[in-house]
Image (cartoon, coloured by chain):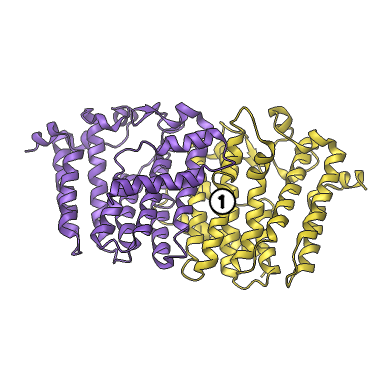
Chain colours: A purple, B yellow
């Protein structure tokens, strides 16, 4: 089955279970709104692509890992948009969850999506205890403390910010988890995939920074120029636009190189190269040609 | 080992892992502040008491279940106190987390504690896959949607509130989970424990309502009269103080009766009776004598 379809089905199934009888109507709607329609589903696609490249031996566990990762990503966006953080009125081109449903439901939606992510992983324990244990440890570490998304976001509350830790925790951690959990979910060695996820995470961060700084990526569906306005670290401001484009290309090349020998290695390398063209607008790619 | 000590040690160990190298200092402090010093640790004590009554066959799994339940309870209090919900300046007799650390760290602390709860449960998968799968499903259902704490809190955002669902989800669910997970963690049949947890959860809710309405329980360490001021359901307002005291006594009696035959049943029944005296101030107990 097409990976994009697998992801949407796994997410629909997860959401259905959380929005069953007894659910308050507002929470039911807000949870669905936070997850559908999605963005590019980059992290779960990476997870499934790695699982597929490793032989796709346990697709139900890979689907659960991919869906959990996307649910946690969506939860982090909902909380990130809250008035006390980015105070973002829009997300993916429409009102953010707190704009549409109020701040209280936005807090609860994020909380309920975090719980749901672990709930669907937990359902795989009886069928694949070892893989599920590894996947759960990987994913929990990538979203919690001391070095997951919560920690990354918490660096924004410090007066002295450790930039490397900030980026690694806020964006990198979930990319690394996506690649590593993809391999773990099918029982494959996961060591080499860490670097693939790390480099891709950095590449997406640079692409995001370029989008924020240049306004050339309309598909982000969120306000631009926020980093500069909020004094947040941004690669396009630090390296210049041309420097950032070169950096992005280097990161993708190094991710491609880091793909280890596995049944689907050639296809995965081609997929990463193609994806890098999607995230870098043609205008910017020409700059660095 | 004394159950109170077991709980504190399990919580300290969990927190230590989450607050390791790389953790932003503010988040590190706020997470500890949210969990220590604790309140009465009622839910994890119930969990360990049931596990003990069932023979305490797998103490490490019971400890993980008890600690996860308390972490999730603490997380719900942190988010519940936020300005968009109760806007409570104090909790357990000192500044609430958002008052002490700011709203952003309060949101992140709650999120990180939720993740940590599932992370420590996940660590038991390899040793006890079956029990962990059951415990995780029970606990996730009690805190998420459609009928866990998040859903209970979300009823406060509805114009028409289903009172029974509201109480069951907001308070009852985690008590039921504590009793049921206690049995599951040691591989005991869990069916009969549901009613014990449900009745005790209702009893604590009535005790809490009495505390809010009468101000007689100083140990709550939070502002009183909030329910009346916010128009929230409160048993002491609905049934009168005397009626609520009778209701509490009936609920405890019915919890005692619901304890099934198990190795430690007599001791557990005595423990529940003693606990009911702790939560009902002597002035109120005399009223209903």
- Determine the residue positioned at 67% across, 50% down: B39
Q: Could you say which quadrant of the image residue A191 lies in?
A: bottom left
Apparent side of residue B248 relative to residue B48 in the rendered image (left or right)? right
In the current view of this chain or complex, which residue is farthest to the left?
A: A289
Q: Between residue A124 and residue B46, name the one nearer to us.
A: A124
User: Can residue A141 be seen from the camera position used here?
Assistant: yes
Q: Position of residue B86 (x, y in %)?
A: 62, 33
Q: Position of residue B34 (x, y in %)?
A: 57, 47
- Determine the residue positioned at 57% across, 48% down: B143
Apparent side of residue B66 relative to residue A142 in the rendered image (left or right)? right
In the current view of this chain or complex, which residue is farthest to the front?
A: A1
Q: Between residue B255 and residue B63, name the one nearer to us.
A: B255
- Determine the residue positioned at 51% across, 30% down: A103
Q: Position of residue B106 (x, y in %)?
A: 52, 40
Q: What is the chain identity of the residue bearing mark 1?
A: B
- Determine the residue positioned at 59% across, 71% down: B58
Q: Could you say which quadrant of the image residue B266 lies in?
A: bottom right
Apparent side of residue A153 relative to residue A29 in the rendered image (left or right)? left
Apparent side of residue B57 relative to residue B256 in the rendered image (left or right)? left
Q: Which residue in the protein does label 1 denote? A: B141
- Using the image, determine if residue A115 lies above or below residue A185: above
User: Can residue B38 be seen from the camera position used here?
Assistant: no
Q: Between residue B155 and residue B219, name the one nearer to us.
A: B155
């Amino acid at each position: 089955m097409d990976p994009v379809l697998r992801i949407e089905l796994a997410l629909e199934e997860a959401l259905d279970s959380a929005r069953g009888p007894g659910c308050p109507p507002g929470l039911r709607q807000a949870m669905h709104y936070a997850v559908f329609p999605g963005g590019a589903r980059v992290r779960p696609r990476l997870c499934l692509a790695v699982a597929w490249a490793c032989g796709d031996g346990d697709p139900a566990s890979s689907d659960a890992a991919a869906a959990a990762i996307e649910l946690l990503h969506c939860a982090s966006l909902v909380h990130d948009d809250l008035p006390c953080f980015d105070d973002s009125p829009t997300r993916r081109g429409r009102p953010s969850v707190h704009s549409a449903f109020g701040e209280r439901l936005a807090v609860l939606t994020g909380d309920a999506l975090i719980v749901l992510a672990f709930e669907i992983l937990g359902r795989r324990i009886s069928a694949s205890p070892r893989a599920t244990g590894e996947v759960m440890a990987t994913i929990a570490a990538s979203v919690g403390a001391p070095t997951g998304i919560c920690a990354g976001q918490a660096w924004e509350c410090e007066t002295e910010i450790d930039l490397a830790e900030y980026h690694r925790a806020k964006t990198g951690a979930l990319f690394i988890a996506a690649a590593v959990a993809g391999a773990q979910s099918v029982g494959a060695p996961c060591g080499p995939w860490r670097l693939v996820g790390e480099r891709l995470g950095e590449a997406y961060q640079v692409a995001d920074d370029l989008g924020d700084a240049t306004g050339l990526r309309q598909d982000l569906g969120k306000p631009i120029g926020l980093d500069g306005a909020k004094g947040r670290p941004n690669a396009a401001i630090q390296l210049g636009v041309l420097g950032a484009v070169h950096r992005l290309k280097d990161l993708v090349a190094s991710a491609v190189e880091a793909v280890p020998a596995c049944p689907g290695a050639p296809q995965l390398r081609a997929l990463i190269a193609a994806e890098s063209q999607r995230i870098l607008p043609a205008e910017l790619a020409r700059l660095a040609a």
